[in-house]
Image (cartoon, rainbow, N blue to C red):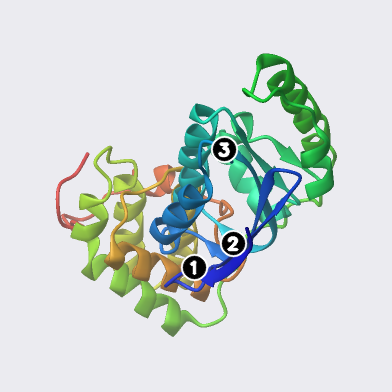
Amino acid sequence: MNFAAATNSGLHVSARTEDRITIAELAGELDIASAPDLRERLLALLRPTSGRLIIDLSRVSFCDASGLAVLIGTRRRATLLGGFLRLASVPPQVSRVLRSSGLDRHLPAFPTVGAAASVSSTPSGGIGGAMQAARLARAWSARPGKPARPGRASGNSTELRDAVTAVLTHVQAWHDADPDRRFTSALQAVAHAGAGTDGLALDTAARSLLSVLSRHPLTHSPMVAETATRLRRVLGPDSDRRSAEPASTQATRPLSGRSVGGPTA
């Protein structure tokens, strides 16, 4: 089986079969915008006679927790079919999100597709193969990577303010997509910073909001996907990294009666 297709959000997915293992290559952004289409495409690759899946992430430029949630769901389906899901060639920006979300404990990652395919496993996904895969994945993921660079202010403050305004205009959609209210403090911090004139404070609050998005998935919402993607692209490729001041700290400041709208935690 071989196929290649692009999701509506621009994520490109191609797949091939080698030695009864399906290898799916992803290219582009694995985020809240591409998650629904990706879920359908990955689940379509799994069948009772083909439950072994390796995901090659070498060409993924960005990933958030909503994207990882798709991989977790696909892994569950593969396991039910007696197979497995393994990650290969995970770039640093994706490894960072895996670790911060704690999902690195559930998604075995290997340096290459060949390494992921070479780990033995029983036809039923038995415990011996699973333990070997987990052990080798931990060993490879423990290798030192590049040091993280500190967050930086975005270059165009007008674009950032426009992107923040879009988020706050549709804040009810964010609340609706966040039943556990994990984003409330970060949204309050963005609203507070947006009411002021300090560009660095706004940059910091916006990065903190995206940092939460990298750790906690939201229920898919086209408006949330659009505004989150716009904000992230204004802030640049390192926008999911924590800024100097966490959103929880900013959220403790008085909001002068200003509300971000919608229900609060």
Q: Is residue 246 visible?
A: no
Residue highlighted by disc 1: 232
- How many numbered marks appear? 3
Mark 2 in CB contact with mark 3 (< 8 angstroms): no
Whether pointer 2 and pointer 1 mark residues with C-beta atoms closer than 8 Å, the reply is yes
Residue at which label 3 appears: 49
Q: Nearer the viewer, mark 2 or mark 1?
A: 2
Amino acid type indicated by mark 2 = Phe
- Seen from the viewer's position, the closer of residues 31 and 10 is 10
Q: Look at the numbered disc 3 and give the secondary structure of its residue.
A: loop
Relative depth, front residue between 173 and 91: 91
At 51% from the left edge and 36% from the top edge, which residue is drawn? 48
Quadrant containing the C terminus in the rendered view: top left
Which residue bears the numbered disc 2?
Answer: 62
**Residue at left offset 31%, top offset 49%:** 219
Q: What element carries label 2?
A: strand
- Using a 10 Å C-alpha cutoff, classify the residue at mark 3 as few (fewer than 14 neighbours), some (14 to 19) or many (20 or more): few
Tell me the mark number nearer the camera, choosing from 3 and 1. Answer: 3
Question: The residue under label 1 is which amino acid type?
Answer: Arg
Q: In this view, does 108 lie above or below 123?
A: below
How far is disc 2 from disc 1 in space, using C-alphas? Answer: 10 Å
Q: Position of residue 123 (x, y in %)?
A: 67, 25
